[in-house]
Amino acid sequence: MFVELDLQSDVPIYKQLADQLIEGIASGALTPGQPLPSVRMLAADLDINLHTVNKAYQMLKQDGFLEIHRKKGVIVQPGTLPRADEAFRERLRRDLRPLAAETVARGMGEDELLELLRSLYRSIQNPPTDKGGTSP
Amino acid sequence: MFVELDLQSDVPIYKQLADQLIEGIASGALTPGQPLPSVRMLAADLDINLHTVNKAYQMLKQDGFLEIHRKKGVIVQPGTLPRADEAFRERLRRDLRPLAAETVARGMGEDELLELLRSLYRSIQNPPTDKGGTSP
DNA sequence: TGTTTGTTATATTTATAGTATAACAGATAG
DNA sequence: CTATCTGTTATACTATAAATATAACAAACA
């Protein structure tokens, strides 16, 4: 598994995990229908508690990124992934706002900020580790 | 004071306060050298605890957005505001990454995301409440 | 001399994060 | 059927952060 946790970070472990799974889906490292490790297996692999993994899985299930079946285990959403609806856009604005504000306060230009985000967006959509890819 | 707190939010009060003060500096609503309410006054005004206000003030002092003197009280940084150094850019990337990832995963286009951030940036730099402004 | 300032120090309450066990019920392979 | 693995639920515990409540101190100022 490509997940890497920072136990010293102020970001909760379950959120780090959920974030990286979403990034995996975004990048194509995790494909629709692909099975994920069981909560016990992944917990053992990452050397964290079963419930911490389960919390991340439950969040992603709630958001529609995962499907969870008995015994079949956890799989990446095989159907249509959750859309960027207005609720998501609202959350996006709420989270981006303080970042944009401090950027302005520190005199960082609009262009540089946008370029930084653009660079992030593209590196996720087309990760540098995958040379070539299967899409084209 | 233009500060509005959401006590039901999962965002800590002291962070909401710090964020809005930074936005005030970014928008020009708070000008360099301008005095801020004392920790006791603002706490009473917002109906929160003295220490919660103090925590926000201390963070902003630590970052260089505020100066704090005995008896003179708290003032907006009269000298040069903190710069957007590499440490800030790193923090920016770290915070933007999960947002960009979920945006990709939800199939929201790069253009729309960038436009959303651009809109936020500009509305902060030139707030809609101030018709005309003193700058020009 | 008072009064207000930031500051420091405790203490308490509340909520979240993370861990540790244990047990339950559904699904599957043998 | 039986054993095993699955998610799931429940409970308990520790640790930490957030927020509040008082109290007191020292510096600055009118």
Image (cartoon, coloured by chain):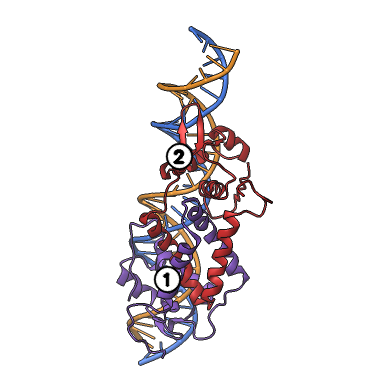
Chain colours: A red, B purple, C orange, D blue
In this rendered view, identify the residue nearer to me: B2 or C22: B2
- Quadrant in which the C terminus of chain B is drawn: bottom left
Residue A92: image quadrant is bottom left
Q: Residue A53, which numbered label?
A: none
Residue A65 position, x and y percent, is 47, 43
Above or below for A52 versus B13 = above
Q: In this view, does A113 lie to the left or right of C3?
A: right
Residue A121 position, x and y percent, is 55, 59
Q: How many marks?
A: 2
- Quadrant in which the N terminus of chain B is drawn: bottom left
Give the Cα distance between marks 2 and 1.
33 Å
In this rendered view, identify the residue nearer to me: B45 or A36: A36
Residue of label 2:
A79
Q: Is residue B50 left or right of residue B84?
A: left
Residue C20: image quadrant is top right
Which of labels 2 and 1 is toward the front?
A: 2
**Three-letter residue code for mark 2:** Gly
Q: Residue at x 51, y 74 (%)?
A: A110
- Per the image, label 1 sits on a secondary structure element best described as helix
Q: Residue at x 51, y 31 (%)?
A: A73
Q: Residues within 10 Å of mark 1 (few under 14, many from 20)?
A: few
Q: In this view, does A40 lie to the left or right of B33?
A: right
Residue of label 1:
B119
Q: Residues within 10 Å of mark 2 (few under 14, many from 20)?
A: few
Q: Can residue B108 be seen in this view?
A: yes
**Three-letter residue code for mark 1:** Ser
